[in-house]
Image (cartoon, grey):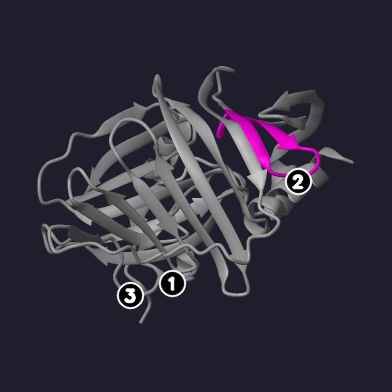
């Protein structure tokens, strides 16, 4: 089977199969152990991620919402399920676009968590995005291991399952996406209203020079409860990598320049009293290019 067909199979399996397992997530020189339960039925997808070491954290996702619970700080964060930045698992959203920007090839076979796996390497054709190595279970098509590779060829994030099973008789399994929480928990809602599918021509904020292969995926505006100010967010994707641009009125002076945390890079600049932040799991040159391309233009009435 060709390499792209394996990636397609993995994407479909990760979304459509019922499974559970444990995996380790290595990032920023830290190791996090997590468990996952994923269910799919006629109502759609439901998924729960639970951290098994360090600070307790539980992430519950369905078709509409993503809920992240921190019991120690008694905090609950609710966001759109599409804004799945709380999950480290890799699931591409546009298979067709990948072959235009990346070289995809089979590099061998391996065995991970008891599963015979095919090794796939997705390497970028430029310096604007990261590469990724995938280990895909031959029988189920599920992802069993992945390495995120930066522009220097270094592994900056790694995920590896220690056990993973497909749930064949899962009709009796349930997953509550609205957990029972008492009044001591603080609820934080990141979004207000529905995200729009506006094109860039409908917005006041634009990009002069879009990095090759990236397209505008969605736009949303939300209110930050702490300040009462609104944040304008644009989300871009090339089908594999994604990044976000946040534009907000400056309430405090932010330092301009670049910053990084593991595989995540960010670049901050100010423009006419606004703070512009580009952030994503892409090379530093990409977020800088995006942030410096943002400009404001009054929309046509």
Q: Residue at x 60, y 34 (%)?
A: 163
Left/right of residue 187 with respect to residue 1 in the rendered view: left
Residue bearing the label numbered 1: 196
| 3D distance between C-alphas at marks 1 and 3 | 9 Å
Left/right of residue 147 with respect to residue 57 in the rendered view: right
Question: Which image quadrant for residue 104?
Answer: top right
* Viewer-side label of 1, 3: 3
Question: Which image quadrant for residue 288?
Answer: top left
Residue 184 drawn at (x, y percent): 12, 58
9, 261: nearer the viewer:
9
- The image quadrant where one finds the C terminus is bottom left
Question: Mark 1 falls on what kind of element?
Answer: loop
Q: Is residue 30 magenta?
A: no
Residue 163: tell me if it is visible.
Answer: yes
Outermost residue, bottom direction? 301
Residue 258 drawn at (x, y percent): 32, 30
Residue bearing the label numbered 2: 140
Residue 124: tell me if it is visible.
Answer: no
Residue bearing the label numbered 3: 193
| 3D distance between C-alphas at marks 2 and 1 | 35 Å
Proximity of marks 1 and 3: CB atoms separated by less than 8 Å:
no
* Viewer-side label of 2, 3: 2
Specify the segment rendered in magenta. Answer: 125-147
Please report whichever mark, 2 or 1, sits nearer to the chain's N-terminal start.
Answer: 2
């Amino acid at each position: 089977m060709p390499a792209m067909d394996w990636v397609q199979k993995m994407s479909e399996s990760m979304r459509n199969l019922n499974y559970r397992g444990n995996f380790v997530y290595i990032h920023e020189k830290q190791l996090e152990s997590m468990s996952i339960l994923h269910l799919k039925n006629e109502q759609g997808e439901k998924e729960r991620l639970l951290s098994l070491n360090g600070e307790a954290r539980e992430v519950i996702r369905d078709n509409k919402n993503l809920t992240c619970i921190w019991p120690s700080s008694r905090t609950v964060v609710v966001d759109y399920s599409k804004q799945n930045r709380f999950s480290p698992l890799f699931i591409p959203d546009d298979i067709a676009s990948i072959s235009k920007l990346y070289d995809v090839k089979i590099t061998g076979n391996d065995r991970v968590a008891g599963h015979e796996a095919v090794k796939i390497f997705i390497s970028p054709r430029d310096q604007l995005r990261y590469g990724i190595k995938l280990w895909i279970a031959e029988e189920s098509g599920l992802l069993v291991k992945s390495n995120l590779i930066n522009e220097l060829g270094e592994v900056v994030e790694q995920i590896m399952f220690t056990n993973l099973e497909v749930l064949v008789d899962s009709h009796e399994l349930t997953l509550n996406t609205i957990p029972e929480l008492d009044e001591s928990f603080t609820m934080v809602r990141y979004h207000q209203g529905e995200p729009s599918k506006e094109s860039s021509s409908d917005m006041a904020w634009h990009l002069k020079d879009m990095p090759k292969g990236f397209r505008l995926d969605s736009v949303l505006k939300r209110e930050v409860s702490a300040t009462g100010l609104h944040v304008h967010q644009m989300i871009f994707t090339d089908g594999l990598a994604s990044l976000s641009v946040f534009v907000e009125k400056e309430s405090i002076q932010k330092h301009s320049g670049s910053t990084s945390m593991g595989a995540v890079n960010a670049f901050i600049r100010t423009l006419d009293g606004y703070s512009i932040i580009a952030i994503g799991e892409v090379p530093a040159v990409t977020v800088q290019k995006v942030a410096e391309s943002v400009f404001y233009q009054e929309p046509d009435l």
